[in-house]
Image (cartoon, grey):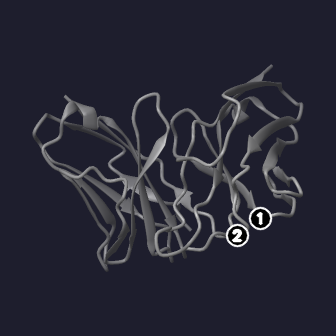
């Protein structure tokens, strides 16, 4: 059973371009969380999605950021018109269900560099 | 905001047990304590979780005090590869405004030394 897959692992974008980050959850997992880790900082929750639904986006910046988790295919975190401050590692985690006794597993992340 | 308090850093000698403390004095009755670690900016790795009983798996043991206000993660025989940032997390309760998300604090940087 493959783990959580994120791609690309490294992404370089010029200021003003769009960044698309993909997250394929573990097989059988229908819950996805996205986190951002700025350099030398801790992980910050961004958004929680179930298939076709955004459940909690309390950590998402109000502008330029969006996320989706379609019925088929990976979850996508989209950042429009990137700025240098968006440079960070973005991690996703998946879980088969939302219960307090069920662990979530993380991918290896996408490292976004904005030049 | 994180509901846990951890020391910022600890050292441990290779081969010895590493005991990482965590305070979570405001934990609610149905909230679990989770431990993850992050090795050199890789994705966080799940270690163990528990509610009120002590737990053990192939990676570690989790000791939770009877009042549930603190816990200790034990790595029984630390190796150099256990050098990482260890996060103690109280998983936010499920409900109308809580979604089971993991809120990471600053963690404890464990340095295992030869």
At a point 46% along the width and 28% down the height, the residue shown is A40
Tell me the tag on residue B30: 2
In the image, taking residue A68 as reference, residue B16 lies left or right, namely right
Query: Is A9 above or below relative to A12?
Result: below
> Is A30 in front, or is A98?
A98
Q: Callout 2: residue from which chain?
A: B
Distance from disc 1 to disc 2, alpha carbons, whole Å, reads 7 Å
Circles 1 and 2, Cβ within 8 Å, touching? The answer is yes
Image spot of residue A79 (x, y percent): 21, 50
Q: Mark 1 vs mark 2: which is more N-terminal?
A: 2
- Which residue bears the numbered disc 1? B51
Quadrant housing the C terminus of chain B: top right
Query: Is B52 above or below relative to B6?
Result: below
Query: Is A97 above or below relative to B98?
Result: below
At a point 26% along the width and 33% down the height, the residue shown is A85
Question: For numbered disc 2, what is the local secondary structure?
Answer: loop
Q: Callout 1: residue from which chain?
A: B
In the image, taking residue B16 as reference, residue B42 lies left or right, namely left
Identify the residue at the far front of this view. B26
């Amino acid at each position: 059973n493959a783990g959580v897959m994120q791609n690309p692992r490294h992404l370089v974008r010029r200021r003003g371009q769009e960044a698309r980050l993909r997250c394929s959850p573990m097989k059988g997992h229908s819950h996805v969380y996205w986190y951002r880790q700025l350099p030398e900082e801790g992980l910050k929750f961004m958004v929680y999605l179930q298939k076709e639904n955004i459940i909690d986006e309390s950590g998402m910046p109000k502008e330029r950021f969006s996320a989706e988790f379609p019925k088929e295919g990976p979850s996508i975190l989209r950042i429009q018109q990137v700025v240098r401050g968006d440079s960070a590692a973005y991690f996703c985690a998946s879980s088969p269900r939302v219960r307090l006794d069920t662990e979530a597993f993380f991918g290896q992340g996408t490292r976004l560099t904005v030049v | 905001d994180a509901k846990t308090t951890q020391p910022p850093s600890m050292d441990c000698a290779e081969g010895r047990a590493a005991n990482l403390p965590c305070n979570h004095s405001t934990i609610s009755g149905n909230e679990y304590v989770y431990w993850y670690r992050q090795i050199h900016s890789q994705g966080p790795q799940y270690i163990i979780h528990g509610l009120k009983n002590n737990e053990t798996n192939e990676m570690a043991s989790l000791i939770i005090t009877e009042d549930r206000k603190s816990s200790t993660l034990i790595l029984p025989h630390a190796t150099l590869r256990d050098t990482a940032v260890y996060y103690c997390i109280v998983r936010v309760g499920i409900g109308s405004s809580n979604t089971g998300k993991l809120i990471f604090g600053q963690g404890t940087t464990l340095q295992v030394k030869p």
